[in-house]
Amino acid sequence: MTTTDAMELLGLQHSLRRIAHATEVHSRRIDREFGLTLPQVSVLSCVQSLGAGAHSRAIAAAAHLSPPTVVGILDKLEAKGMIRRERSALDRRVVHTTLTEAGARALRAVPVPSGRQFQDAFMALDEAVRAGILSAFAQVADMMEAPAIPATPPMSG
């Protein structure tokens, strides 16, 4: 690895730490002020976007979370009175989720996750630039989720 490579990696790690810190600060604020986690806000937003009768698999896909995680989040949101779940009359295995007025109020009150300034600046970028950023972030996320490959032990001779 060259010095330039090492400096690029350090710069990337620094940027990732800054993003993680900003997300953590925002997450603590939302939890303190509204009693919600960022994943709960994300799921509430997806329930609202999908409309009345959304089911957990669709919510999970929209929120980019696993179905079991979403079910746990929905349990907590239902206990807080922010969503209502009802079994389908046609297929009892299907559960429809609806946002309650309390959930809608919470969504209106919670600030934009990344901040209005970031959102406005990002949306002001050219569409191709935004697509490039999204692609790069997806690649970084994929690299960070990749399982660690153990080092190959030296061959003994």
Image (cartoon, rainbow, N blue to C red):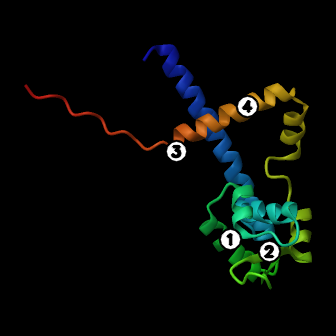
Query: Residue at 60% across / 33% down in the picture?
Result: 14
Q: Which residue is mark 2?
A: 97
Type of residue at label 1?
Ile
Query: Is residue 52 shown above or below 133?
Result: below
Query: Residue at 85% across / 52% down in the picture?
Result: 112
The residue tagged with tag 4: helix, strand or loop? helix
**Nearest the camera: 54 or 145?**
54
- Classify mark 1: residues with Cα within 10 Å, few (<14), some (14-19) or many (20+): some
- Residue 33 in sight from this viewpoint: yes
**Nearest the camera: 91 or 105?**
91
Type of residue at label 4?
Ile
Q: Which residue is mark 4?
A: 133
Please name which of the two marks, 2 or 1, marks the residue nearer to the observer.
2
Badge 1 vs badge 4, beta-carbon distance below 8 Å: no
Q: Which residue is mark 1?
A: 73
- Residue 30 in sight from this viewpoint: no
Badge 2 vs badge 1, beta-carbon distance below 8 Å: no
Type of residue at label 3?
Glu
- Earlier in the chain: of badge 2 and badge 1, it is 1
The residue tagged with tag 3: helix, strand or loop? helix
Query: Residue at 65% across / 38% down in the picture?
Result: 138
Q: Which residue is mark 3?
A: 145
The residue tagged with tag 2: helix, strand or loop? strand
Badge 1 vs badge 3, beta-carbon distance below 8 Å: no
Disc 1 versus disc 4: distance between alpha carbons? 29 Å
